[in-house]
Image: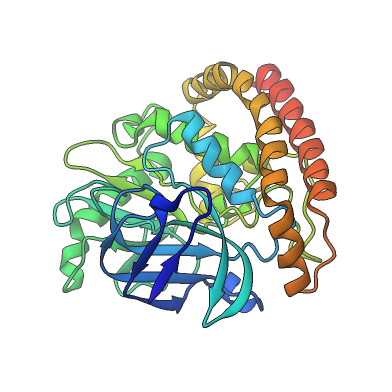
Amino acid sequence: MVQIFSQDNPEYEVEASAGVRGRGNTTWQYIKKPYRIKFDKKTSLFGLGAAKSWVLLANYLDPTFMMNTIAFKLGHQFGVEYTNHSNHVELFLNEEYLGNYVLTEQVQVNEHRVNIDEETDFLVEFDRYYDEDFKFKSALINMPVNIKSPDLEDESGMDFVKKAINALDEALYGETSGFPNSNWQELIDVPTLIDYIMINEIVRNRELVIPGSVYLYKKGDDKIKMGPLWDFDWGFGYTESGHIYYDNAKTWLYKKYDKHSSGPGGSFFYRFFDDPTFRQAYKARWNEMKGTLENLYSFIDDLRYELYQSSVQNNKRWKKNHDIFDETDKMKDWLQERIEFLDENINSSF
């Protein structure tokens, strides 16, 4: 049984039968565990579209509790389709207090999530863990592709997905494709590609280039589209050694992890910047959107006051000594430095 209580919004209170299980790859290794809720029936939470599956993000490494929330805010700001919503909650499991979590949508095909046909369209994930029952690697750059939808019975059902992904692979890296004068722009939606890369670059999310949790989908005869956005635990200047954030504000993500020094994620996303028409479109979109980034600072200020008491209790529970005000001050400084770096370099070198 899952119960949701809300002092401010009693209309969001829920009591419904559901199962709870662990989830996540790297994040499951930490003592504060992430979870997935699966209701017996489709259920609306916090006014969002009804579905059976929901996710509780633990944000164990995140000293601000809001890195995923900020990335999702950017998604909504840029108009990225199917962007998740963040609802910060206090989690009790079997009457044990587990701290502050973000309750959000499961990335899946659903009329209120990724709204595509479950049989004729596809949702896939580029991910190094390569752990779905049905998966393949692209023909040229060995991109690990996990099939999330459709629900397949045998490998022959992957053929239409392979065809679409390998066609893009060929357009980008085929010896006779003539890139950038190939047909690559006929295969993937450029505006959504730009927004997806730009948001990940703003917060310097290393998952983009590894790759990890990189989603894309194709609906009918439409072009491939990037999204939904997911997993920003390795963003905001994260350094794996020591689990340090706010590093490398003045370094490119796509240049550091380019086709010469990284795995398939870097090879894939770096390649588009070899096309001068893409660089010009990227520059134009940056200059269109950069003014809207100023509101991130007030958003962070408002959210840290909202989360303060919860952060204190969470840190006591998990024996952490972070102060949310100190950490978000560092985050704002890092974001300001990063945005200034990107603005200068996009406008001078693109």
Please give the name of the residue rendered at 66% of the width and 43% of the height, measured from the top-left corner. Answer: 303
Q: Position of residue 261 (x, y in %)?
A: 65, 52
> Which residue is at a point 81% across and 66% down the rendered structure image?
242
251 vs 102, nearest the viewer: 102
Left or right: residue 287 versus residue 13 is right
Residue in the foreground of this view, choosing between 59 and 131: 59
> Can you tell which quarter of the image residue 293 is in?
top right
Which residue extends farthest bottom? 94
Tell me the residue at 30%/36% (across/down): 187
Indicate whether 345 appears above or below 5: above
Residue depicted at 70% across the width and 63% down the height: 61
* Quadrant holding the C terminus: top right
Picture quadrant of residue 105 = bottom left
- Residue 171, by quadrant, is top left
Q: Is residue 118 left or right of residue 215?
A: left
Q: Quadrant of the N terminus?
A: bottom left
Asked if residue 118 lies left or right of residue 263, the reply is: left
- Residue 179 in view (yes/no): no
- Number of labels in the image equals 0
Residue 284: % across, % down = 53, 16
Tell me if I can see residue 181 in this picture.
Answer: yes
Residue 212 point in image, percent of width and height: 52, 59
Question: What colouring does the structure picture have?
Answer: rainbow
255, 139: nearer the viewer: 255
Q: Left or right: where does residue 151 sit relative to residue 15?
A: left
Residue 92 percent coordinates (x, y): 56, 74
Q: Is residue 338 depicted above or below 169 in this figure? A: above
Q: Is residue 22 above or below residue 274?
A: below
